[in-house]
Image (cartoon, grey):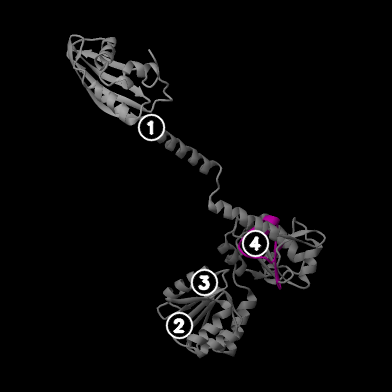
Amino acid sequence: MGKISPVSAKYIIHAHIEIDGVVDKPDVIGAIFGQTEGLLGADLELRELQRSGRIGRIEVNVDTKSGKSQGEILIPSSLDKAETSIVGAALEIIQRIGPCNSKIKVQKIEDVRISKREFIIERAKELLKQMIEGTMPDSQELADEVAYSVRVMEIQEYGKARLPCGPGIEESDEVIIVEGRADILNLLKHGIKNAIAINGTSVPDEIVELGKRKVLIAFVDGDRGGDLILKELVTVAEIDFVTKAPDGKEVEELTKKEIHKSLRSRITAEQYKLEYNGLRSEESIRKPMQEQRRPQQMQQREQQKDRVMPRGRYRKPGLSDDEKLNFGQMLEDLIGTRGAYILDEKLNILGKVPVTELGTTIKSLNTGIYAVVFDGIIDKTLVSIAERSSIRYIVAMDSKVDESETRITLVTSKDLE
C-alpha cells in the first residue's frame, strides 16, 4: 500500500468512529476503501490516490470496551482543500463495518502548514531572545561604549613623564591632581577636564612646575594610600587646596554628586599641615574632608566682618526649613549644568536659563522674582541687578560678595549642608 511522505502532506483528516461490536483495524480500512469505491469518480478513487501518493497511509486506532469499539481515523492528504474535504465527507457515509453498525464523524481537517508556521514562530521567538540576550547590546551599553571611547580620546599626556591628563589643563586656572588614569576617566565622564594624574607615589617634576603657575587641588582616595600621597604632595609641590574621597572609596568610583561634594569641602594646604602635623590622631586622618571643622582663617574672617558691620543691619530674613530643603535640592540638580532656576514666592520654578543669560533674564522680568538658584559663583554685578529687581534670595555654589554689603540674603552650598 502506498505511503505519503509526512513532509509533502498538507492536510490531515481527523475522524471519530463508533462501532456496535468488535472489529479489527483491517476491517475498518477495508470498509473505507470498499464502500467509497466508485462513489467519488476516477479522479478521487482512494486506491488510486494512495497509489499515486496523494493520500497517505490510513491510520486506525480502535479500542474495545463492553462489546463496543470506538477510536480515531487519521488520513494524511496532499490534495487541495476542496478535494480533501470531499474525501473527509465520504467517510461519513460508511454505516456498517463487517456485520456491525458503525458511525463515522469527521471532527476536523488539520492544516499541517499552520502547525508548521506556529512552530516556526515559537522557534523564531526563542532564537531572537537568545540573540538579544547573548549578542545584541542594548542602547545604554552602546551609549556607554561610545562615551567611554570619547573619554579615552580626550585623555592627553603632559610633560616628559607623559602624565595622563584632561584636555583643559592649560586653559584652566585650577588643576586637580589625582592618583591614576582611572581617576582621570571618571572625572572626564562627569565633565571635569582640568585634572592630571601623578601615576605613582612619587611626585613628578611636572606637578612641581604646575604649582608655580596654577592653583593646585590635590584630590586623593579615601584610604591610607591617599593619606601618604597627600602628605608627599603638600611637602614637595605648591599645593593650594586638598580634599579626599569619602572614607573607603576611590576617586574612580565616585558619582557626580560625590565628586562635587568632595571638591566643595576642600581645605587649604596650610590648614591641612596644621591639622595633620600632630594635632589630630591617626583615626581622624582617615575621616572624609567634608567632616572636618572650618579653617581658622574663615572663622577669623567672620569675626572681622562682625566687627566691621554688625549683623542684622538689613534685618535679613532667615531661611525656613522648607526653603533650605528646596534650595538644597535645586542646587544639587544644577551641579555641572551651568544653569539657573528663577523662583516665585511659593518656590515654584518660573523658568531655567543658562548662567550666561541670568542677568539679562532678571532685567527683562524686572519684578516677580523671589529667588534665584544657579550653578556658579555670586559676584557684585549679579547682586546689583538683583537688588534693582527686589530679589530676596540668591543661592549659588559660592560667593565673592560680602553678605554685609547687600540687603539680599546670599546663600551658598555650605549654608545648606
**Amino acid bearing label 4:** Leu
Q: Earlier in the sequence, mark 1 or mark 4?
A: 1
Q: Which residue lies furthest to the front in this view?
A: 42
Q: Against 65, is 391 above or below?
A: below
* 174 magenta-colored: yes
Q: Tell me the CA gap for discs 1 and 4.
A: 56 Å
Callout 4: helix, strand or loop? helix
Q: Tell me the CA gap for discs 4 and 2.
A: 36 Å
Disc 1 + disc 4, Cβ < 8 Å? no
* 150 magenta-colored: no
Q: Give the range drawn in magenta.
A: 172-196
Q: Nearer the viewer, residue 122 or 285?
A: 122
For residue 73, the mark is none
Q: Nearer the viewer, residue 231 or 386?
A: 386
Callout 2: helix, strand or loop? loop
Q: Which of marks 1 and 4 is in front?
A: 1
Q: Nearer the viewer, mark 3 or mark 4?
A: 4
Q: Tell me the CA gap for discs 3 and 1.
A: 62 Å
Q: Earlier in the sequence, mark 1 or mark 2?
A: 1
Q: Mark 3 points at which residue?
A: 331
**Amino acid bearing label 1:** Ser
**Amino acid bearing label 2:** Tyr
For residue 188, the mark is 4
Q: Earlier in the sequence, mark 3 or mark 1?
A: 1
Q: Mark 2 points at which residue?
A: 370
Q: Name the residue under label 1.
A: 115
Q: Tell me the CA gap for discs 3 and 4.
A: 21 Å
Q: Nearer the viewer, residue 205 or 271?
A: 205
Q: Which of marks 2 and 3 is nearer the N terminus?
A: 3
Callout 1: helix, strand or loop? helix
